[in-house]
Image (spheres, helix red, strand yellow):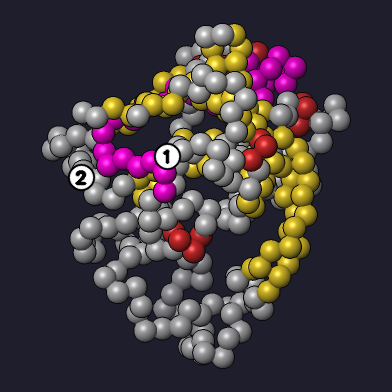
Amino acid sequence: MSDEFNLEGRSFEAGEYHLWTALDKNDGVNAALKIYATNMTTTECCDEDNCYFYIETDIAETNITVWNDYISSPGYEEVSFYYRSAMVQGWNKFCIQGELAVVRAQLPGAVSNASGNPDVANLSMTARASSIDYYPMWPGTWMLGDLGRAIFTGSTARMWPFSYNECNETISNSQNQRMNAYTGAYLSNAENTDPECTESGGSTSTASTFTYQMDALSSNWGIHMAGYLDLVTYSVEWNAAQMNPRKVMVEKPMYFIFNVAMSSSWGAKPPNAGTLGCYGDGIDAICDAFPMKMKVDYIRVYRV
């Protein structure tokens, strides 16, 4: 399977193409600052032999009413999103189980000379990007098991980011999956006023006053500048090599996802994240760099 994106002006709206669907949906997780819209993605050509698929992210404030299960009295609330971007999925259309996947892409960032980005001023294509403020987005080319549809949170409950094929309490201190997910207790926390919640046991001196719980750890490091200024080839391959870690061949079919996310809770975030939008008014060079694009030259999957 491959998609070379060689036809200009393609639409990824639902029903337009057999491999991909672009979403029209707000993102309700990770303190999201953007909504996903189908008109923020298409294909374009620089010349006859150089075409690519892209996701554009731009400044655009949108106010919508959403249902929130996680406030003290679940109900509707007004939410503001300050950007528009895109997510394109292959969910329920094309899946793989292992094999070799290759993507050639260019990541978005404020990398023009006018942006004032120190990484550009001291340009070395092999140096790592280090001025995080100039890369305010979370671009993604990734895969997820087809049982769950990304950002449809009800479908991914208790399967993302972990899934297991065996019971092993030593894998993680806080596994989120069991043979039977129900453990007999009603979900209770300080803000839940449901009468079925168990009562507090009162204060105690046996536990620390501050605790930190982590369900997943993502280890990230700066990519070299070529990743933002040129198209770079990325690949992932499955094999049966008994190396560290031991390779477990994928049993569940996985589909591909392209998206560019923005959040007020990540290290990479735009100016005024979570309080105001970013305004391209000549005051902030990072804001003036919008719109930004993630470009994808091709995706290729090989049977090995």
Identify the residue at image location x=34%, y=73%.
Answer: 181
Q: Residue 132 colored magenta? A: no
Question: Can you see residue 134?
Answer: no
Query: Percent x, y for residue 127?
Result: 50, 17
The image quarter in which residue 249 lies: top left
Label 1 Cα neighbours within 10 Å, binned few <14 / some 14-19 / many ≥20: many
Say which amino acid is labelled 1: Phe
Q: Which residue is mark 2?
A: 248
Q: Please tell me whether mark 2 sits on a helix, a strand or a loop.
A: loop
Q: Quadrant of the N terminus?
A: top left
Q: Residue 99 colored magenta? A: yes
Q: Which residues are magenta?
A: 92-120
Q: How many marks?
A: 2
Query: Percent x, y for residue 123?
Result: 58, 12
Identify the residue at image location x=64%, y=68%.
Answer: 68
Question: Can you see residue 282?
Answer: yes
Task: Tell which of 11 and 127 is nearer to you.
Answer: 11
Q: Please tell me whether mark 1 sits on a helix, a strand or a loop.
A: strand
* Numbered circle sitting on residue 58: none
Q: Which residue is mark 1?
A: 256
- Tell me: 249 left or right of 61: left
Q: Quadrant of the C terminus?
A: top left
Identify the residue at image location x=73%, y=67%.
Answer: 77
Mark nearer the viewer, 1 or 2: 1
Task: Tell which of 209 and 65 is nearer to you.
Answer: 65
Query: Percent x, y for residue 273?
Result: 71, 45
The image quarter in which residue 75 lies: bottom right
Q: Reply above or below: 70 against 253.
A: below
Q: Reply above or below: 244 against 120.
A: below
Distance in Å between CA atoms under marks 1 and 2: 19 Å
Say which amino acid is labelled 2: Val
- Tell me: 55 left or right of 226: right
